[in-house]
Image: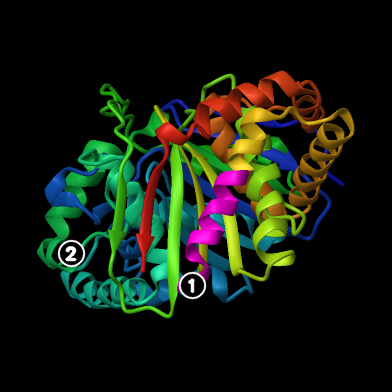
Amino acid sequence: MISSDFLTYTLGNGIRLIHQQTNSPVAHLGVLINTGSRDEAEDEHGLAHFIEHSVFKGTRKRRAFHVLSRIEDVGGELNAYTTKEETTLHSTFLREDYERAAELLADILFESVYPQKEINREKEVIAEEINSYKDSPSDLIFDEFEELVFDGHPIARNILGTSENINKFNRDSILNFIGKNYHTDEMVISSVGKLKFDRLIKYAEKHFGNAVTKLRTDCRKPFENYIPSVRFEEKDTFQSHCMIGNIAYDVQHPKRIVMVLLNNILGGPAMNSRLNLALRERRGMAYNIESNYTAYTDTGLFNVYFGTDSENFEKALALVKKEFKLLRDTKLGGLQLSKAKKQMIGQIAVSTESHDDLMLAIGKSYLLYNRVDPLHEVFKKIEAITDNELLEVANEILDENRLSTLVYR
């Protein structure tokens, strides 16, 4: 059972700790770092993701095999991911192995040595990852749409980088990037599991407390001057693939939660989303139709993706725009709005049942806002959304004159 109380603590070097107590025999621990691909210089494109791969390749006291075996030998899992603004290392394990996981995460974060031999091998792995991505237009179009929308800004660049850039990386490249961008006051240790908080603090102090204090002094370059664009690309694909969207609200914006609800109504994960009903269920025009909203530090992105037979493309795009117009022109009725709120509340509640996802969610919230709202507070904010607020956001974000479009045909 999960309590709504989150326990927090700050180490002397600025690293923050957040913990959620559970009764499960399985625990989850992660380190979230407020650094991602948008923090790269142009000649560093792909480096944040490359570091995420290379961090497991050996430390001062462990070879690569021993890094992986340390937690997997006791049935646990070790993983990592990179986004445009975050790098996260995390582990899942039996609760009696809490200190083992904490020590391992600290070791790979602060004591990795990045052997050149291992780095060279990982370059080949990432080159294959890039090639695999290029072979999947339904994945590639997401990155190219961000390049279109955020044209020329660091946030526009994809996370994987290019093969040409990655071939230039070496141990010095990695250490220089970490030195510039891994700040202790921009790190959060997030924990969900059955462990007394004073014991967790002891583990954190022991394994993370000796890291040298490094505070962030600069700010990210803000994104400004969005210009809507339309681009068609000829691709040798069976389907036409389309992305259409607009910039949206940043992580601190008061309308962000209204935007989340609007996105959920339009093309969220439920099968009864408006776009799924319009294109897939009623007309069979698309296998995959979805909308997404991502909030960044200083901006955000809303987009709709669908893939359809070339003969149906114009009809499908017209249907998407029709749903946009309906949301711009017509307030949701009381029953519709109530159902939309209940659906979103239910989805959030269900997501907390995955303790791994919960660990990452509370860690990100604490990293960005230095707080985590209890579920009942989140639900209260959702319940407070009005039909006027939803209409206002729809007219700002779904404005036809502000939309960008990218089509593979």
- Front in this rendered view, residue 296 or 339: 339
Q: What residue is at 36 percent from the left and 71 percent from the top?
A: 133
Q: Secondary structure at mark 2?
A: helix
Q: Which residues are magenta?
A: 309-322
The kind of residue on which mark 2 rests is Ile
Q: Is residue 106 left or right of residue 161?
A: right
Q: Is residue 327 left or right of residue 11?
A: right
Look at mark 2 in the image and give the residue it sits on: 166
Q: Residues within 10 Å of mark 1 (few under 14, many from 20)?
A: few
Look at mark 1 in the image and give the residue it sits on: 311
Name the quadrant of the C terminus.
bottom left
Q: Quadrant of residue 197?
A: top right
Q: Quadrant of residue 381?
A: top right
Q: What residue is at 38 percent from the left and 33 percent from the top?
A: 184
The answer to if 317 sits in the magenta stretch is: yes
Measure the C-alpha gap from mark 1 to mark 2.
Answer: 40 Å
